[in-house]
């Protein structure tokens, strides 16, 4: 029945018909099995059904090609476990008694081709038993796949021999160390959290892989190959055994339905599929929560349980494999001791007798940094005692004192808070925190759940303190080193987003919650006011820095009055930097860092009594600009021709570095008829600064925006100025959206291209309108337009909020040009995929209510998602 000529024979009509027949039969059988599952059959029936079905078709193919006559076909990986998900790969090991000869290789190639033609995504390897043993001894991943292998067909002797060799070479301790390292690396890849907004239900912390690791190390240690066997061997309690089975079933359901909904192998709970997946589970939304949010909350709960049980079992296996280290214990006090370099309780009833020892356990661990962590016994005791953290527990002075002491420690604060959150102690002690555990954020720039974002902010604050991270943000490290009672910043971080999801202003509600916390924990009035101020205004500094003109002394003066003191200013600056950095890697940038630092330094000078008057600012910048120009060897009067055409507003809106750069670039072009474009690397942060100097015209801004959009360059900031003699002197800060381009190589190109663009036809080719991102499609930002007179009464402030997309600013610029509106300044703020832009504008018709309404209507239409 086997082939004698390999792939040449395979091309015959008979064999093609055979493959097509198997393909149709396999498709029909798969659809039947999935259909039964969708009607309510258990997920285990689906996985075993697909695995068994695949076995039958693989056997037919192996028999038809003759491979099973000389080699053993072994299922490995998930297929080896008998858990084949709808679109998972089929992993096969072909065990040959010796290196296959040419004829056998041909038969194997024919088999693999047949399996693919049947519709099976096959991954295969051909090995002898000695080769398998050698690779398994060197690679724990190979050993793992072989541990779960099973024979499908072919000589039994080959599989029996393989099993015997594996048993001989398996070293449980080495295997445990390898799997721990492997898990650590995998968790790092997924940012060490199960709470990302699009987790991988297989690979992320708390996913199915974390459960499989437990079965692997337990099997290797001889402590059981199933949850029931592990419970009988004392690795799990009866309750934990029931819980882990239930959680595993739920995660398998999620992964299986995810494959079915996606119609492909997809293990990420991506936004595109979350709503459909919720529907597959029969989950419906509520007036305040989407169905997808309900689904994800159940996932996060399951993932948290997996993380807990993963920790317990791995520690227990380690104790079994290194028994001598766990025997001796040294007492710390009447409740706690040290065992195997971990904190333990002196007996099983400690927390049952006195639940107040729960928080003290975490404080004790903090105070003993030489310890690796807690023993499984202590962690189980904490988990079992969590119901004791009731209102009376929270009112107890000893517990309040211990919680404050945890925050006040010089080290281990972040680790302790994360550990407390992992074991539901943080939410047990702070019910307001429990409300935001696992809560999703659909604001297009947070990539973590609310509780994880809060802990990321704490992490960032703690990094300011740690000397090994001082190189990251030297100013922040310097400020926090001189800040008295820095633990108050941690309190503010814990509460800054504590009221997310309550419908109203979360800053105001959070400040009230923070005041209550400070009062019942007996903080001084001064400290209470500081914490409440930070929570209430944790968004203020970012908004001022990114939306207002920092060159305007009145802006700095108003912000300084709000701060009131240097201590508040320093505290808010530190919290703001930590907060923005804790939202998403995309949100923080060197440009935003510069804006915040500029606002901080200017405000601090004002609070310190240094003059903020416009005249003083103007003269100071002129002197510094002249000093810079002299460094380039220019004559003391070279700048005068240009400066005669510049007003006070120009000098107040530009830095000394910008003023000197403009003067150098335009010395011989003050009355040019041809547009002048000059570029330089941004002095602070990434990106390019682009100077555009040309005779003013109503469509200049829109044409410049059109060019930048055509090059897929984002405008981060724009300073628009018109000289006394009618020239536009505009400066743009642009970025390539993180595409990794080399800005230095772009300098000449931008100068040449933009000059040609401005000299070309007025109707330059507009860039194609861009589509919104996958994330934005599912969580769009409702566009808003707000137009109001500025404080001077001479101009108007235009504020826009919308979902970001390529070409958005160009669309806005075209609307403004169509209405005859001139842009005086532009502050372009991008928060992930949400834009919040502020323009200072002018126009002859803006004083008419009808014109304002039409402008707002047209802008809303331009901002609407495509």
Image (cartoon, grey):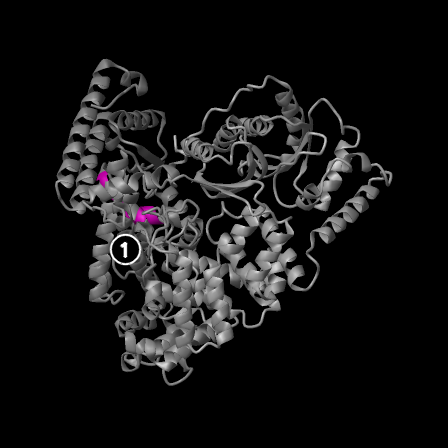
Q: Which residues are magenta?
A: 144-152
The residue drawn where x is 66% and y is 34% is 722
Disc 1 marks which residue?
302
- Up/down of 189 relative to 33, above or below: below
- Up/down of 436 relative to 663, above or below: below
On the image, the x and y values in percent for residue 98 come to: 34, 36
On the image, the x and y values in percent for residue 128 come to: 35, 39
The image quadrant of residue 111 is: top left
Provide the secondary structure element on which disc 1 rests. Answer: helix
Q: Residue furthest front?
A: 848
Question: Would residue 340 be seen by someone viewing this image from the given angle?
Answer: no
Residue 800 shown left or right of residue 255 in the figure:
right
Between 501 and 236, the residue placed more toward the observer is 501
The residue drawn where x is 48% and y is 77% is 524
Q: Residue furthest right?
A: 635
On the image, the x and y values in percent for residue 573 come to: 56, 59
149 part of magenta stretch: yes
The image quadrant of residue 220 is: bottom left
The residue drawn where x is 20% and y is 18% is 17
Q: Residue furthest bottom?
A: 334
62 part of magenta stretch: no
């Amino acid at each position: 029945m086997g082939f004698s000529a390999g792939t040449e024979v395979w091309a015959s009509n008979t064999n093609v018909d055979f493959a097509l027949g198997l393909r149709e039969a396999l498709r029909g059988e798969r659809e039947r099995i999935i259909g039964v599952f969708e009607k309510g059959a258990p997920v285990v029936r689906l996985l075993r059904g697909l695995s068994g079905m695949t076995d039958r078709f693989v056997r037919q193919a192996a028999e038809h090609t003759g491979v099973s006559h000389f080699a053993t076909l072994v299922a490995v990986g998930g297929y080896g476990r008998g858990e084949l998900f709808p679109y998972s790969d089929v992993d096969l090991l072909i065990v040959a008694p010796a290196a296959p000869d040419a004829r056998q290789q041909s038969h194997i190639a024919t088999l693999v081709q047949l399996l693919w033609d049947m519709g099976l995504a096959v991954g295969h390897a051909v090995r002898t038993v000695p080769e398998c043993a050698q690779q398994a001894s060197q690679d724990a991943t190979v050993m793992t796949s072989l541990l779960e292998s099973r024979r499908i067909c072919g000589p039994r002797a080959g599989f029996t021999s393989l099993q015997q060799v594996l048993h001989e070479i398996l070293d449980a301790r080495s295997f445990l160390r390898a799997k721990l390292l492997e898990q650590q690396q995998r968790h790092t890849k997924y940012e060490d959290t199960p709470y990302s907004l699009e987790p991988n239900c297989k690979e992320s912390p708390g996913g199915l892989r974390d459960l499989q690791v437990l079965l692997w190390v337990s099997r290797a240690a001889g402590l059981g190959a199933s949850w029931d066997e592990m419970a009988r061997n004392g690795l799990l309690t009866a309750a934990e055994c029931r819980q882990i089975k239930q959680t595993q079933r739920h995660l398998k359901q999620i992964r299986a339905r995810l494959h079915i909904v996606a119609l492909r192998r997809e293990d990420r709970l991506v936004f595109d599929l979350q709503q459909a997946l919720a529907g597959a589970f029969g989950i419906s939304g509520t007036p305040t929560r989407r169905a997808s949010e309900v689904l994800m909350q159940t996932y996060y709960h399951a993932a948290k349980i997996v993380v807990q049980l993963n920790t317990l079992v791995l520690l227990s296996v380690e104790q079994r494999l290194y028994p001598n280290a766990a025997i001796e214990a040294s007492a710390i006090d009447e409740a706690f001791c040290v065992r195997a370099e971990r904190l333990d309780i002196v007996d099983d009833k400690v927390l049952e007798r006195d639940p107040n020892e729960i928080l003290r356990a975490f404080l004790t661990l903090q105070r003993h940094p030489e310890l690796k962590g807690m023993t499984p016994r202590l962690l189980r005791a904490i988990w079992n005692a969590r119901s004791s953290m009731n209102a009376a527990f929270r009112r107890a002075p000893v517990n309040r004192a211990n919680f404050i002491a945890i925050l006040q420690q010089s080290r281990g604060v972040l680790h302790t808070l994360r550990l407390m959150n992992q074991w539901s102690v943080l939410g047990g002690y702070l019910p307001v925190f429990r409300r935001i555990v696992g809560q999703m954020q659909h604001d297009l720039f947070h990539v973590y759940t609310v509780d994880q974002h809060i802990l990321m902010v704490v992490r960032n604050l703690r990094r300011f303190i740690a000397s090994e991270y001082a190189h990251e943000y030297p100013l922040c490290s310097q400020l926090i080193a001189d800040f008295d009672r820095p633990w108050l910043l941690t309190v503010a971080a814990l509460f800054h987003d504590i009221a997310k999801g309550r419908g109203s202003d979360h800053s105001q509600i959070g400040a009230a919650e923070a005041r209550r916390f400070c009062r019942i924990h007996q903080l001084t009035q001064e400290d209470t006011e500081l914490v409440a101020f930070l929570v209430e205004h944790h968004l203020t500094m970012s908004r001022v820095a990114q939306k207002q003109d920092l060159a305007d002394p009145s802006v700095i003066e108003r912000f300084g009055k709000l701060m009131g003191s240097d201590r508040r200013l320093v505290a808010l600056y530190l919290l703001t930097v930590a907060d923005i950095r804790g939202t998403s890697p995309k949100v923080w940038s060197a440009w935003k860092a510069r804006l915040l630092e500029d606002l901080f330094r200017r405000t601090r000078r004002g609070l310190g009594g240094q003059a903020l008057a416009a005249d003083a600012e103007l003269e100071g910048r002129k002197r510094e600009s002249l000093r810079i120009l002299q460094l380039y060897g220019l004559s003391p009067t070279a700048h005068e021709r240009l400066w005669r055409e510049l007003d006070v507003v120009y000098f107040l809106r530009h830095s000394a570095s910008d003023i000197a750069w403009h003067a150098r670039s335009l010395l011989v072009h003050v009355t040019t008829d041809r547009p002048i474009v000059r570029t330089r690397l941004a002095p602070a942060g990434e990106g390019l600064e682009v100077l555009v100097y040309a005779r003013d015209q109503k469509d200049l801004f829109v044409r410049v925006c059109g060019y930048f959009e055509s090059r897929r360059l984002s405008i981060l900031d724009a300073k628009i100025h018109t000289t006394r003699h009618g020239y536009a002197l505009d400066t743009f800060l642009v970025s390539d959206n993180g595409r990794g381009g080399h800005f230095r190589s772009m300098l000449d190109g931008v100068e040449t291209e933009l000059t040609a663009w401005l000299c070309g036809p007025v109707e330059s080719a507009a860039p194609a309108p861009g589509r919104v991102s996958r994330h934005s499609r599912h969580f769009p930002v409702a566009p808003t337009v707000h137009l109001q007179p500025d404080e001077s009464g001479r101009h108007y402030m235009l504020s826009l909020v919308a979902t970001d997309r390529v070409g958005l600013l160009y669309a806005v610029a075209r609307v403004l040009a169509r209405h005859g509106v001139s842009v005086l300044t532009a502050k372009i703020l991008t928060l992930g995929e949400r834009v919040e832009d502020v323009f200072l504008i002018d126009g002859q018709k803006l004083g008419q209510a009808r014109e304002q309404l039409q402008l707002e209507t047209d802008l809303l239409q331009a901002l609407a998602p495509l």
